Amino acid sequence: MSKKQENVGVIFAFIAAAMAGMFPVLVNRGAQSIPPIMFAAITTLLAACGSFVYAILKGKLHELGNRKSYASLAMITLCIVVIPYTLFFVGASKTSGVNSSLLLLSEIIFTLLYTPFIGEETTINKLLGAMGVLIGASFILYNGKFGLNTGDLLVIVSTATFPIGNFYAKKALNFVSPAIILFIRFLIGGLLLLALSLVIEPHSNVLELVLVHWKLILFTGFILLGVGKVVWYEGLKRLDISKAISLVMTFPLFSLIFLVGFFNESLSFYQLVGIAIMAVGVFISIKRASVDAALTRYGT
């Protein structure tokens, strides 16, 4: 991978982080009004529609016939959509918008645990970059007191399968484009979430709620999930997994900007310290060169 392409990947990762920062804040608000798994299903299916259009525009629909990608696509759907979305949307309905955003950084811990098994060496710079982001987020989350409720724990657990899904996403990129990965994961994942919601959630006034909150649903599903994940995969294919995740994990910074700018929340001393520490971790992550994919287990 050339330095120029890696720099492009960094830009894509930061754009994805900005969009990801808005996502948990809006999910937190939407999931408190709409049954959370139904909210997840509708927004995911909207993202599938956007991804389908993207696949058509890129001329990639023929890749659906590549059977070599099917196993990886199944694991991506399970580990990035079905399991984590169910846990996250339910958890976000039981905690704050800030916690919904910051606790997603638990993915960094699981990534560091998993990457030695997928062929990426755990280096000092990798650890420093990831831990800088994580420690900074801890300061922001602490904010003078600390405590976890059921919603917080669900959000943390929801991140456990993301690194596995990202591993299979890197494998799938050897056979199909990001457009196809997104379309399949959102379509199949959305249908499974819809089926789960119909079984376990009440639906007496769902249609009314959807009509009331249609702008929130459309923006969350089509823009933040659909367009946001296209940007994420464009970054992921240019960076190694650890670097891409470390950069996109800056999304709490954008969550705070969103909360301050649109919901009039103020920043405390602890949150400002956390932002500064996180910025150092991001800088270290940017300076580290990505691992050559040919040396990893997802390169083929």
Image (cartoon, rainbow, N blue to C red):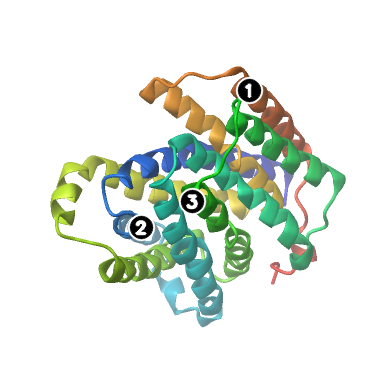
Separation of residues labelled 1 and 2 (CA atoms): 35 Å
Amino acid under label 3? Answer: Thr
Q: Is residue 27 left or right of residue 290?
A: left
Q: CA distance from mark 1 to mark 3?
A: 24 Å
Q: Percent position (x, y) of residue 202? A: 22, 61
Q: Which residue is mark 1?
A: 270
Rendering coords of residue 71 (x, y %):
54, 78
Contact, mark 1 vs mark 2 (Cβ under 8 Å): no
Rendering quarter of residue 110: bottom right
Nearer to us in this view, 26 or 153: 153
Tell me which label, 3 or 2, sits earlier in the chain. 2
Give the residue at x 47% y 49%.
151
Name the amino acid, label 2: Thr
User: What's the amino acid at mark 1?
Assistant: Tyr
- Mark 2, residues whose alpha carbon is within 10 Å: few (<14), some, or many (≥20)? many
List x then y, in percent, for residue 22.
Answer: 43, 37
Label 1, secondary structure: give it. helix
The answer to which quarter of the image holds residue 249 is top right
Nearer-N-terminus badge (1/2): 2
Q: Quadrant of the C terminus?
A: bottom right
Q: Which mark is residue 150?
A: 3
User: Is any part of residue 224 visible from this angle?
Assistant: yes
Which badge, 1 or 3, is on the more N-terminal residue?
A: 3
The residue sitting at 51% across, 61% down in the picture is 80
Image mark for residue 44: 2
Q: CA distance from mark 3 to mark 2?
A: 24 Å
- Report if the CB atoms under discs 3 and 2 are less than 8 Å apart: no
Q: Is residue 135 left or right of residue 205?
A: right
Residue 214 lies, with reference to residue 272, above or below; the image says: below
Q: Nearer the viewer, mark 1 or mark 3?
A: 3
* For residue 87, above or below residue 282: below
